[in-house]
Image (cartoon, rainbow, N blue to C red):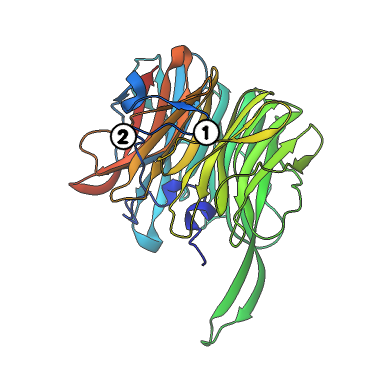
Amino acid sequence: MRRVRNWAVAALAATVLTAATATGATAATAAGAPEADGVQVDGARGAGARFTPAKLPFEGAVLSSGAQLDARTTWAAGFRTTGAGQAAGFTPVVAERVGGNGAWRELPSPVTDFTGRATAVAGSSPRDAWLVGDRDRRTGRILAQHWDGTAWTSTTVEAPPGEIGSLYLLGASAPRPGRAWAVGGAAVVTSRTPGPVPGSESVEYRTTGLIERWDGTAWHRLAAPEIDGDWWLSSVTEIAPDDVWAVGNTAYPDDRPVLLHYDGRDWTRVAAPAFTGLYGEYQSVAANGPDDVWVVGRAVLTDKDRGHPLVAHYDGRSWSTVAAPEGVAGKLWSVTAVPGGMAAVGWDTSGGPDRPLGLRFTHGRWETLDLSVPGYADLSYQAVVAGPGGRLTAVGAGTTPKSSTYQPMVLTGRR
């Protein structure tokens, strides 16, 4: 059975999470999860973890990414939506919080006259940050903006050769000044044939993963491993100049995780560990160090399954799948490294209104995180970042019963 892959090809929940389409991707709360094989699960409602929604300086936006730029500075980025249906457009937005209890403020507009999404933010400090995203379908411009602490600068991304149907940068990593990575996918036209109606045509594309590296002066497209069929990358993290991981997945019909590693010279594909399910997709990667790397995504157990959390870990020698708590449904969209493990967020679309999903795995124990907010009909989280003192910040968007317009959401909690 062919399953719809739009959420992955567009490669961001925010594509669905727009007031323009008003379809609403949502999230899942894993409350009261039973004990899984070999791991212990704390009780419901996050075992004491408390999350507080923030007052944001703008409305009508979807927040799709976040970054901890230093011990005091947190960023949340995304886009406002304009228009509806085929006329829908987007305007990138970035908000900044200085201090754990500081107020959020909106930064100057990253770009003008742009109708694509801002999908990922990363940086080494409040004076060295990157915002990347889509290719504007009108102008062909690819979003890649650099922030120096006072202003944004546009940079040019090297696109693959050929006629581009769509291109999107979905993940970014910039742990060092003057260096950055961005990954995503590009759909290149492979053929055009006349259609049955005069003046019409059938266009075929092939989507391949995109790897871009900033060397301090320009972006350069690096060769990716040969992978059959359509595939793309969703996330990247640099541990060292010769130790970089990127993840994504192939498309229908095999729909398998893609795991790549860079050794300072070449990118190679690494075999993903076995998992339970018909299909699997990797969405986000983060690391505590070279021997403590985490990947999260979604496993589809049956043809009717909407997804269950998929988690993998690298201990410096080999990758293994970590059993998620039983009874928890949904997809994990973002992971951040925390001492002793990781925290991840996403959403569950398996029953009725979409509900937020938050999990934390430290020292061999699972903990559910209560990311729900009273008064919201649905709520999804697309990013989570870890700050000092065990502080977690989750960003996303949701709607209320009175309005289908998505509103930005930021939750902050301590553990």
The residue lying at 34 percent from left, 15 percent from top is 101
Q: Amino acid at mark 1?
A: Val
Of residues 407 and 247, the one nearer the viewer is 247
Classed neighbour count for the residue bearing mark 2: other residues with Cα under 10 Å, few (<14), some (14–19), many (≥20) = some
How busy is the neighbourhood of tag 1: few (under 14 within 10 Å), some, or many (20 plus)?
Answer: many
Q: Is residue 161 left or right of residue 345?
A: right
Q: Which mark is residue 141?
A: none
Q: Residue at x 47, y 53 (%)?
A: 7
Residue 391 rendering spot, x and y as whole percentages: 42, 18
The answer to which of 296 and 362 lies nearer the viewer is: 362
State the SS at label 2.
loop
Query: Which residue is most to the left?
Result: 402
x, y percent for residue 62? 38, 41
Work out whether residue 104 or residue 152 is closer to the camera in this orientation and state it.
104
Across and down, in percent, residue 366 comes to 46, 27
For disc 1, the marked residue is 121
- Please tell me whether residue 60 is drawn above or below residue 70 in the rendered image: below
Given this view, does label 2 or label 1 mark the residue nearer the observer? 1
Tell me the residue at 40%/16% (across/down): 415
Seen in the picture, residue 108 relative to 332 is either above or below; the reply is above
> Is residue 162 placed above or below 235 in the rendered structure?
below
Q: Amino acid at mark 2?
A: Phe
Is residue 144 among the parts visible in the rendering? Answer: no
Q: Which residue is mark 2?
A: 58
Quadrant hosting residue 56: top left
Q: Residue at x 45, y 30 (%)?
A: 384
Name the residue nearer the viewer: 127 or 351: 351
